[in-house]
Amino acid sequence: MGSKSKWNISAAKNGNEFLNIEGFEYHKNKINFLFGESGIGKSLISKIIYGAAAEYGLEIKVNGVTYEKYLESDINKKIRKNGFFVFQEPSTHLNPLEKISTQLTEGDLTSLRNETEIFNEISPGVSKTETESILSVYPKTFRPSGGEKQRILLTMALKKIKIYQSGSEDAETLFVFDEPTGSLDNKMRNAFIDYLLITHSYKNFSAIFITHDYSIISYIENRHKNLVQNILYSELYKAKTLEFRKFDPAKYLNWIKERKNISKSKKVGNGDVVLQFDQGVEIFGKRLEFINFDGKKDERGLVIRAGDAVYLKAPSGTGKTTIAKIIMGIYSPEKASFTIAGLKSPKVNKHSFYKNKIWGRKAAMVFQNADESLNLNSKVKNIFDGLPIDKRDSEEFLKKNLSNFFDVTIINDFSEKKISKLSGGQKQRLNIIRTMVLSTPLIILDEPFNGLDFESIDKVIKMIDTLLSMKCGILLISHNEEIVETLVLPSNIYHLNSCSCQ
Amino acid sequence: MIKIISRNKDIFWLFNWITGLLLVYLWCTAYLNTPALKNVVEASVNSFQIALISTGISALLGWGFAILYTSSQSAGKKTLPGILDFFVDLIKSIPQIIGLLIFYIILTVLILNGILKSSFSQLLFMSLGAAFFTFYEFMSLFIERVNYYRKTEFFDAMRSNGIPEIRIVNVDIFLKNSLAHIVHKAISVFGTVLFLQCSIDFIISVGLSTDVSLSNLPLSLGSMLAKLDSKQDILAISNIFTNPAYISDLLTVHLQGISVAFVLIFSLISINKMTSAMLIKKEL
Amino acid sequence: MKSIMIKNFSAFLLVVVLSAIFIVIIQNQYRAERSELLSLIEDIIKIEGFNLDNPSHRVMLEESLNYQYGSSSYVDSVLTKLEEYRIKRFTDPELMAGGVKKGITYGKLTNLIFPFLKFVVIFILSFILLYYGVRTAALFRFIRYKQGRSSELEYLIKTVLNKNQRDITEIFKSAGYILLKTIAYLLLFSPAYVAAYAVKTKVDTGSFLFILLLSVLTNGALISYTAKFFTMLLHESRKGYVENAIVKNINNNYVFNREDGIKLKSLFKFSKNFENHVLNQIYKNALFQYLPLLKVQAGFLITGLVIIEMALNLHGLLFYEMLKYVLYKEYDVVIFIIAGVFAVVKITETLIDLYFEQIKLKFENK
């Protein structure tokens, strides 16, 4: 029990090797949490080991043998027979032309019919009738929601675990969970972790759990201390080559403790109001309300002052990003009233108002997905092209910030790099720098810690501090509650509530 | 070079196409009389020229309308995109060949009235006709590309940072992220125009050969095929069903019609192969 | 559904109104031309015993007119019109012996009914045939692709170059396959008129079946849309739900007629179903993406059919008739035919839109 499984893996496309790791490991019959910034290769390595990378047309070698041979090996056949892979993007991993109930009962999942129960267990607050209604539909963009889709994929994996556990033998197996909690709020995330850890304790199985959510460590330490012997933490990082190492949970626990102490010393800001968002927003048939830190509906609505950070939190799918997009004039709500740096949002000609007065001038927004927000075919040095700023100033700014927030020794070489070649954390920091240069009175940061490793999170926090010192008002949207709560004062935390307009 | 050609099927087929055409030319210089050879070359050059100019005009029209469409969309206006949708839909519903026929009727009137005199102006008008019935292919592509980036965070992330929308569309979307798509579409439209233009020339030369005849029009592969001697050459192909050895006659005695048909069909095959290979290689 | 009907119907209505306007304008022009032509000469051509084709009669007439009006511009105009009239009796259908009225007439419309119906029937049948052919050929190509079959040419070169195990039978088999494939490519990409002329002396090119086959096989119809559908299959096969289906261990083997593979019989059925196989999910999704493209396929097919009907130069085919009317400059009839074809296109598009919308609604949980 608990023996190591070591892997040397390489992958190339058209003869160009782009992944090579020696000594990647996971412990058998344990839950192996794997951290590391996005784009570093965690998913691909796991897919290769599982045997799910055959369709990518890559030249892969696993422990010295070709992928074709590896797929034919006993060990991989068993992994695929007994295991499961939960893919990262729930919205694209469900067949849009098959009912969810069918997708939960096909292939290997035919033999057990406990999907409703499992889905219910990992969905606290969702009734059985609601579950049945969710399972009876065809998956579409907004229905089921992102969180529900994620739980559907998790249900598939958990069903397969139950099937494996119902067998008598201790066969070779592997369950891979690739970012399984990215679309879940903390309540749902915790329910899933509870279910996984408790199920694992009945009959152990091997699992790789890829995540960026370090707050899981705190949750497990607090809630499942008795099960920590079943858990291992490790991370992938890029030095000169791609490396694998153990991750000490104490490193994170100490860091968060320290952050909490820093936050206690923060003072209430008294700068000018850069955003005044009144109560009573109505959009897509929903009414959204801002609830302040003491749990009351704040009549003033949402207020952000220059030099202050405000955290808007809510369960996934409530409408946090929707609020951000309303502020930025991307969505047109049925009803909303707000003022950005003294300019009241108009009822008509909104587009020219935003184009001429707001975008990049009074407000700017960093979207959550750096891969989508940046032009990957541009070079780092062109990151500011097209922005409403002076070109010479921007070059200076870029140089200064690249040296501040990137571990790069030769700035000029780095500037010439194509953005697509950067790591996930580098892209996210570049994404923030692009908005930083504008130093607009209001800056919205949507999920700024998405896909980041521990070091990158620390650097992004420094960037936020810099923005605050530049007297920018910041609206933070994140599901990473534990970290974000250390960045703002309790009085600057707003909960977003949603209810139907009818 | 050989490595690039063997690894990239699209380049392989471009190479094949050019080599194929050169081989046909060399073969023709050996077996075809000078006036006929001159005609074959002129017809090929004219057809490719019309297809090329037409593709260019088509791309420009498509781009222009797409910019109009997407900028109205961005500004939240619905009327102009609605009207454009309606009319493009209308043009799409007219079979391209009928549309071209109408253009040729107008062309005849313009020639007879002495308005279009030079062969280049006629060539340009023919290209314009084909472009009018293919520009929507480009327009749809451009709009599709913009909409693709609108669905992701790309467009909103850029404009909310103050980057002008016209720049996002033209530089960031079209230039930096859609060149492969545009080249692919251009090759495909080139093939469509080549096919349509040859077909309409053939039809007109065969079906309207009276005083309304457009025999004064620039020679093309289609009108070459419609010539009596070329038609005889094509008719002779069926002889190989009963006498396979007749193939040598086809490649020497009946060379005019056979080479014209081959240039046309081989070009269509190569173009199709290139576009298919690009689709797979670039995952368009 | 309602919006589809409104959109298509309004487009159709616009074309009908525009066509009607053009027809009225053209017919008025006919009348104006006719009255302009006859206004000066109507009385002369009615003179009993006067034969316009007889040169001596024409000379006598000219002398009489000169005598009556002197050598004036009026006489010149009359003589010019008479000459114009004389020539038009050979070219203008209305003035030809036993000629019919120029422009749209009841008789002409009745004569167009059969060619029109024939066109519609060929279109419907070729549309169905093409729909079947495209799916079958694309699926076959996709399965071969998944089987990892390399190009036959590469195989042939390798076999020829392999000095140790040069198998002559294999070389011939492979060369034969390449030859057949080349011929097939030449046919599939060939414009219909080239293919038709190439077999004209051996086959009845005017037969219904020949036109049907020509419309499906040539002009690049089958090959282009097969390539499009194949690309869609390929695109779908790379999607996440396929990965998810594979990890559920749904059959993913592409060998023909193996228990966990592809049943050849399923491939050739009109309504295709690959039960318990990943291909089923890929195919159904690709087909769903392809459905709206059927409108483009229909337009392409009609263009092909128009080319065939015009190029084959056979009486009784709608577009041969249309060319004839272009030749006679009876543009009102031409516009009428075009409006008819437009109606066929619009009806097809509406039906495809409605069918697609119905399916879409189901998958959108509505």
Image (tube, coloured by chain):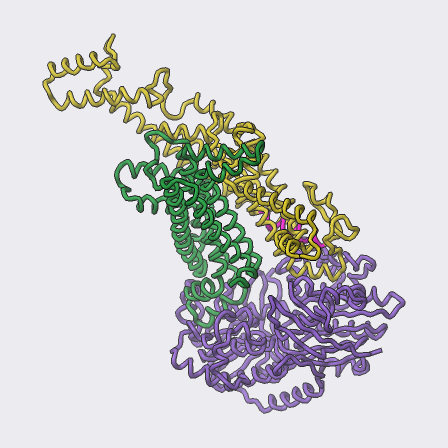
Provide the major secondary structure of the magenta segment.
Answer: helix
Please tell me which residue lies in front, A185 or B268: B268
Count of all numbered marks drawn on residues in the image? 0
Q: Is residue A435 left or right of residue C264?
A: left
From the top left corner, tell me how far across and down residue A103 is, in percent: 73, 57
Q: Look at 25% across and 8% down and name the residue there.
A: C49
Chain the render paints green: B
Residue ranking furthest to the right: A168
Quarter where residue A320 is shown: bottom right
From the top left corner, tell me how far across and down residue A415 is, in percent: 48, 79
Quarter where residue A480 is shown: bottom right
From the top left corner, tell me how far across and down residue A104 is, in percent: 75, 59
Q: Which residues are magenta?
A: C278-291
The answer to whether residue A119 of the structure is visible from this angle is no
From the top left corner, tell me how far across and down residue B32 is, in percent: 41, 41
Residue ranking furthest to the front: C163
Please tell me which residue lies in front, A385 or B223: B223
Q: Is residue A168 left or right of residue A325?
A: right
Image quarter hosting the N terminus of chain C: top right
Q: Is residue A254 positioned above or below A4 on the image?
A: below
Chain the render paints purple: A
Please tell me which residue lies in front, C63 or A104: C63
Is residue C290 on the magenta stretch?
A: yes
The answer to whether residue A133 of the structure is visible from this angle is yes
Q: Is residue A10 positioned above or below B206 on the image?
A: below
Is residue A434 on the magenta stretch?
A: no
Residue ranking furthest to the top: C49
Quarter where residue C238 is shown: bottom right
Please tell me which residue lies in front, A264 or C38: C38
Q: Color used for chain C?
A: yellow
Q: Is residue B142 left or right of residue A252?
A: left
